[in-house]
Amino acid sequence: MATGQRHGHGFTLMELLISIAIVTIIILMVAQLMSNATAVARTGNKHIDTDTQARVILDRMATDFAKMLKRTDVDYYVKAPLGYKNPKAHGKGLHLKTGEPGNDQIAFFSEVPGYYPAGSSSPVSLVAYRVNAGSTTSASYLKLERMGKGLLWNGLKIQNQNDPYPMVFLPGQIAAGTGPWAQQWYAAVNNDNSAKSTTDPDYETIGPGVFRLEYYYLLKDGSISDVPQVKNNGVSQWNFSQTLSANLNAFSDVQSVAVAIAVVDPGTRSLLYDANTPGDPYWRLFNMLSDMADFKNANGNGNQAHIVGDVENNWNLAVQSAASTGKTADGSAFPPAAASAVRIYNRYIDVRTLANL
């Protein structure tokens, strides 16, 4: 009887090589998809970081502005033809000279709680915002700071020297160069942090990713301006023989204060740090800051009317240019990935409530 024979057939060498090649291609495709998904997730997380930070900051500003003391007998430190003690306090824009902050500042009285000795509660505060432009070695350098200096209404008895300063009306001005408040409130109107009097323990870093701050006014006639006063037949009625408070008239001409900020996430800020330049390790961030023009230098300057969104558009164009060329306007290198991570935000904060005249 014939014995049946079984013949086994295995894979040929060519079939094995083709199989390995196909598996390799599949693995590479999956790896690429995972890499792209990770990059998208990383970018999304960065945007979430900046979105969350911007929302918190602008909400805080909205609360402070909503409770601002709008009176003719209190002082303000705001952008106006007369008001800033140092003209460099609201920046020049477009590649500043070393030492110029390039950011706006603001200080005013507000009925929000402030910082002062434990166990006490302040009914009113001196509120100020600035992007720290002091020492480059400071932990808060090129970060948004907020002051909430707790005060008492004048007329309340001060029990001891640790009690807060009283809230004073004119002539006790925020920006007074002399008098009892010149040193106590000096940090609210200066930004160099070069001396003890320019720093203040009531400042806190509220926006560690915010490196650019600009504000302007939406007036009740529908125009936007860096002068908080409606023009009469196109002519400013600002009277330089009067005080800022007299011209401002308790924000009577202002509908909203428009606030614009530029924000980077912590990872991007670290990427822009240059340890080899101890004089200014954040020179790249400073260059980007200086490419973001001031309101007065935004599109629409000159005889044309300013248009809502001009400042923010100018800033976005500066960011997009750096992202595509890898350089800022002066030709200095700027990582495109870092430029792509910079986010611009703005909000119009309503201040049209009736003034407490």
Image (cartoon, rainbow, N blue to C red):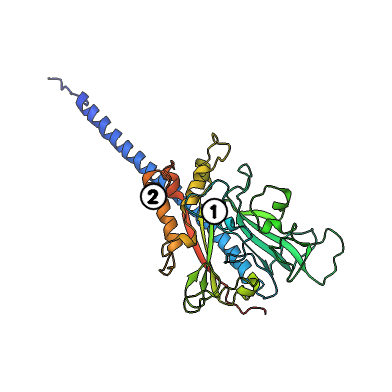
Q: What residue sits 57% from the left and 52% below the top? A: 101
Q: Give how far across and how far down residue 70 sits, in percent.
A: 65, 74
Residue 69 appears in the figure: yes
Residue 268 appears in the figure: no
State the CA–CA distance, disc 1 to disc 2. 20 Å
In the figure, 30 relative to 342: above or below?
Answer: above
| Front position in the image: 249 or 289 | 249
In the figure, 221 relative to 244: above or below?
Answer: below
Say which mark, if any, is on residue 102: 1
The residue that disc 2 covers is 321
Q: Give how far across and how far down residue 244 sits, in percent.
A: 63, 70
- Which amino acid type corresponds to the residue marked 2 in the rendered image? Ser
Q: What residue sits 70% from the left and 57% below the top? A: 186
Say which mark, if any, is on residue 91: none
Tag 2's secondary structure?
helix
Q: Give how far across and how far down residue 77 sits, in percent.
A: 64, 64
Badge nearest the viewer, 1 or 2: 1
Q: What residue sits 42% from the left and 60% below the top? A: 313
- Disc 1 crowd rating (10 Å Cα; few below 14, some 14-19, many 20+) is many
Q: Quadrant of residue 154?
A: bottom right
Q: Is residue 74 left or right of residue 36?
A: right
Tag 1's secondary structure?
loop
| Front position in the image: 22 or 50 | 50
Q: Residue furthest right?
A: 159
- Which amino acid type corresponds to the residue marked 1 in the rendered image? Gly
In the figure, 57 relative to 306: above or below?
Answer: above
Q: Quadrant of residue 122?
A: bottom right
